[in-house]
Amino acid sequence: MAPHGEMAAPASTTATAAARAAKRAAEAAARPATKAPATVAAAAPPNTPPTAPKAINTHTTTTTTASAEPRSQSADVVIVGAGVAGCALAHALASDGRSVLLIERDWGRPDRIVGELMQPGGIRALQKLGLEHCVEDIDAVACKGYHVFHEDRNVWLPYRKDKSPSEGVSFHHGGFIMNLRKAARKCKNVRTIEGTVCEFVKADNSDKVIGVTYTAKQGEKVITHTAYGGLTFVADGCFSKFRKYITNKEVKIRSHFVGFVLTDCNLPAPNHGHVVLAKPSPVLLYQIGTRDTRILVDVPGKLPSQGNGDLKRYMENVVGPQLPDSCKKSFFSALETERLRVMPNSYLPASVNKKEGVVLVGDAMNMRHPLTGGGMTVGLWDVVHIRELLSPKNVRNLGDGKAVLRQMKKLYWQRKSLSAVVNILAQALYDLFSAGEDANLRVLQEACFAYFERGGLCVQTPVGLLSGVIPEPMTLMGHFFSVALLGMYNLVRESSLLMLPWALWRAIVVLYTAIVVFMPLLVNELR
């Protein structure tokens, strides 16, 4: 409203002028700096109040957002999505002096069935980011390693004691996310917005991204607003709506996790992840609270219908009988009371960022089967690398698209040592652990279990790879083919003299199967 005695300008005229001015300011700020560091927010003189809202549309209504911000804003960085990667990145960049707009569709506590086990390598990344406190005060449970069950045998796979940290932690996903969001909001340079991001804003006569539009509710109305930034990060998760505009790689889904919570489950090895090599595919159990245990059942192929009860019957008749005896009571009890949650198990190799002004991070960029629980570890280390590569000493103005692209190309290769290990291991182990009726994969599955039973380096190094503390792809390849050679040896050793030629042929086929499983993954991850 205009002050008393003054006449207000028409709303549409004011908003249109503001939108044009804002876009010009964003484009100007996006041009490389020649002398002093330049950012969108730093364009104004010292102690100047924030600029007027810069909306693409002609509405003048102020949106209701998580932080009650005006309807259109600008900053050095816009981050889409306040999950693990988005919050960690907001905290990291703000700690380095960048101004950040963090946009999230729903700031309420999320409820997911994955992203609940943090490997020791992920804890190390949290420590480097100053976010290790985010796993505290959420009833988290220390994780000291794994127990793997195969028919009537089981083997213990402890985390390495000579690597620090030597423990992981598991928790309810929502509690961890709320702590990350709290940490991000505490940064004075972070402003939070509740809204649904709609599309990228591009510079005139250019394909360069200079921000996003988003919608937010105001009363009964849904208003479109704009957030401008020198650089936009897309961290909107596994179901990313913007991925297709940035990469042409497709998500592959081979199975789904069906998850629910078991109350007071008597796990054979408390404070450990449990992997049951069930048929046709593995089952995971791990504590996420003092009384709560998460069970994740991998269901390959087409998912049985929940509506007609087929999925529940699958759990009762196929999965339940294969679980450790001590877990069965709480499993069957939970089936009667808990909602069966479903999540696709996706694989998406990373790609080099080639689009100016925007960067994919987290699951929007790179995914692997969650069997090994390495996704958050990879995502958090990506944030560590991004913080260093885009630090003010390396890139003074994040609106300098060419400079950012050069650094993101470095990121693509810098992250490979860890991401390749985690991704290849997750996909390759899933192939072995879900052998089904494939005779050659069953040989490799049995050999993998026998390899673990040998102990020593046959456990320490694979667990170091799995936990994210040994980022060495060639070491992984050596151990994988050692498993294949053990399987070949067992075939020949157990064969009679009469059947030896057949056993030798089978051994060659098993080696070929191992190559078919491993090498395409290696090529995908390292090229």
Image (spheres, helix red, strand yellow):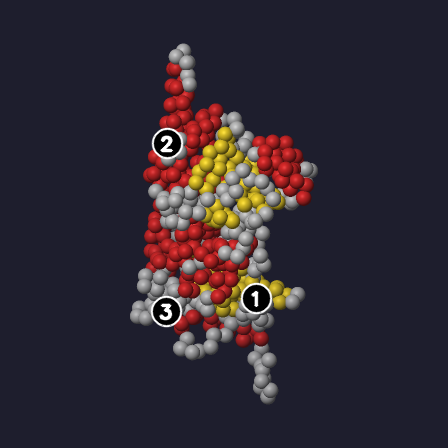
Q: Amino acid at mark 1?
A: Thr
Q: Amino acid at mark 2?
A: Phe
Toward which corner of the image does residue 35 lie, by quadrant?
bottom left
Please determine whether, in this image, residue 222 is positioned above or below residue 516.
below
Q: Residue at x 41, y 47 (%)?
A: 166
Query: Which residue is labeled 1 in the image?
Result: 65
Disc with the residue nearer the chain's start (3 vs 2): 3
Q: Nearer the viewer, residue 381 or 103?
A: 381
- In three-dimensional space, the C-alpha distance between marks 3 and 2, rounded to whole angstroms, equals 52 Å
> Residue 240 appears at what percent x and percent y?
51, 51
Q: Quadrant of the C terminus?
A: top left
Q: Nearer the viewer, residue 232 or 103?
A: 103
Q: Amino acid at mark 3?
A: Ala
Most extreme residue toward the left is: 35
Crowding around mark 3 (Cα neighbors within 10 Å: few <14, some 14 to 19, many 20+) is: many
> Residue 443 appears at what percent x and percent y?
45, 26
> Residue 407 appears at what percent x and percent y?
34, 56
Query: Which residue is labeled 3 in the image?
Result: 38
Most extreme residue toward the top is: 498
Most extreme residue toward the bottom is: 5
Query: Which residue is labeled 2 in the image?
Result: 481
